[in-house]
Image (cartoon, rainbow, N blue to C red):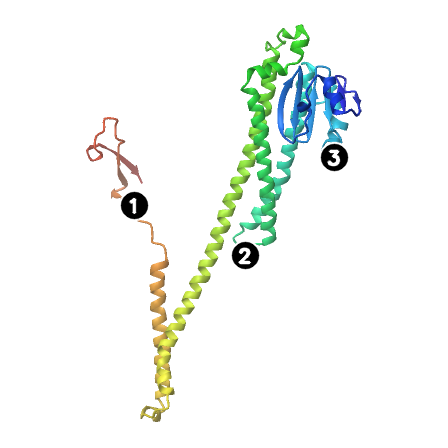
Amino acid sequence: MKFDKNGNTTYFEKKKTELYQELGLQARDLRFQHVMSIATRNNRIIMRMEFLKAVITPEFLLILDYRNLSLEHWLLNELASQLAGEGQLVTYSLPFEFRAIEAILQYWISKLQERLNTLQPQILEILEALVDPKLLSVDRSKLHILLQNGKSLSELETDVKVFKETILEILDEGEVIEELCLSKWTDPQVFEESTSGIDHAEEMELLLENYYRQAEDLLNEARELRVLIDDSESIIFINLDSHRNVMMRLNLQLTMGTFSVSLFGLIGVAFGMNLESSLEEDPRIFWLVTGIMFLGSGLIWRRLLSFLGRHLDPPLPPHVRMASWGSCLTFCVPRKAEANGRSSRHLPTHILTLDL
C-alpha cells in the first residue's frame, strides 16, 4: 500500500526480490519479523512496529503486507488524510518523512494507550470487589479474571518498554538522527534553518523525544496499576489470614472448653462404675456432684481463656513520658551531632515549650 505526499493511495503486489531491488535495499531489510526497530538504509527509513512494517522515502510511504485487521481502519480512514495535511500532526511544515514518522509513532502510542484504557477500569473494578472487608471469602472467578488482566498488563509493560528503548537508542545516536532527515541529503535547501531557528535534525530529535516522554508517562501509569495490584494482593492475604486466625482461635477455645468438661467429667465416670458406696443413697448427692462438675468446668475454661488472651493479644504501645508544669509542656530535643564527631551525651539540647 503506497501513499504519496498528497495522501493518494495505490495498491500493488510485487515479489520480494523486485521490491528491494526497486527500493535499493537488501533482502534482510524487508524481512518480516515481529520486532520493533527504526533504521536507515540507502536514504530509506525502515520502520518495524511488530505487525506494522513500513518503508519511508522523501516522496512516498510504503506499507508492507497491509492486509491486517488491526491496520485496516487506520490505513483506510486516517493515514491518508494525515499525510495530506488534514490531521492533527505537528510536522506539516516539515518534509514528508517527518509526517510519515509522526503518523506511525502516533498510531502506535495510541494503540498502547487504548490497551491501557481497556485494562484499567476492569482491574480497578475487580480490585474494589476483592478488597471489600465485608467479604469472608474470595470469588475465584474474579481472581481468574484478575490473573488474565495481570498477564495482559505485563505484556503491555513489555511493549511500552521496547517502544521506549527503540526511540532512546536513536536519541543516543546523533548520526542516526541526521540520517532520518532524508530530504536533507536530496534537497540542499533543507540545510537552511526553519523559521523557529532549529534545523531539521533538532526537529527530528524533538519529535522522537516527545513520543519518548509519552511512552514514559504510559509506562508510569502501567506501573502504578501494577503496584495497586500488588498492594491489593497484600490486603487480600491479610484479610484471609485474619479470618484464618479467627477460625483457629475459635477452634482453640472450643478445644479448651472440651478439655474442661472432660476433666470434671471424670467425677461422673467415677460414679458410673459398678461399685457400691454410701453416697448413692443420699438424694442430694446427685445435684451436688453435678454442680461441682459444671462450676469446675466453667472456672477452668475461664482460666484457660484468660491465659490465651494474655499471650495472643498485642501489647499496648508504650506511653510517651512528658514533664508538665502548670499550663505548659516541655520536651528536651537533642541537637544533631555535628561533623566533628562529638559524643551524643555531650550534645546540648533544645528546650521546646508548648502552651496549653
Q: Quadrant of residue 169?
A: top right
Q: Which residue is mark 1?
A: 320
Q: Residue at x 27, y 44 (%)?
A: 322
Please tell me whether residue 336 is drawn above or below residue 262 in the rendered image. Answer: above
Q: Residue at x 58, y 43 (%)?
A: 150
Q: Is residue 245 left or right of residue 332?
A: right
Q: Is residue 320 left or right of residue 117?
A: left
Q: Which residue is mark 3?
A: 69
Q: Residues within 10 Å of mark 3 (few under 14, many from 20)?
A: few
Which of 154 and 277 lies nearest the eye of the viewer? 154
Tell me the mark number nearer the camera, choosing from 3 and 1. Answer: 3
User: Residue 7: x percent and y percent?
Assistant: 76, 20
Residue type at mark 2 is Ser
Q: Residue at x 69, y 23 (%)?
A: 27
User: Residue 275: x percent and y percent?
Assistant: 34, 91
User: Residue 96: x percent and y percent?
Assistant: 70, 16
Q: Report the quarter where the N terminus lies.
A: top right
Task: Tell me whether the residue at label 2 lies in contact with that at label 3, contact meaning CB atoms closer than 8 angstroms.
Answer: no
Tell me the mark number nearer the camera, choosing from 2 and 3. Answer: 3
Helix, strand or loop status at disc 1:
loop
Which of 194 and 23 lies nearest the eye of the viewer? 23
Q: Quadrant of residue 338?
A: top left
Q: Residues within 10 Å of mark 1 (few under 14, many from 20)?
A: few
Q: Which residue is mark 2?
A: 137
Tell me the mark number nearer the camera, choosing from 2 and 1. Answer: 2
| Residue 51 in view, yes or no | yes
Helix, strand or loop status at disc 2:
loop
The residues tagged by marks 2 and 3 sit, at their Cα atoms, a distance apart of: 42 Å
Of callouts 2 and 1, which one flags the residue occurring earlier in the amino acid sequence? 2
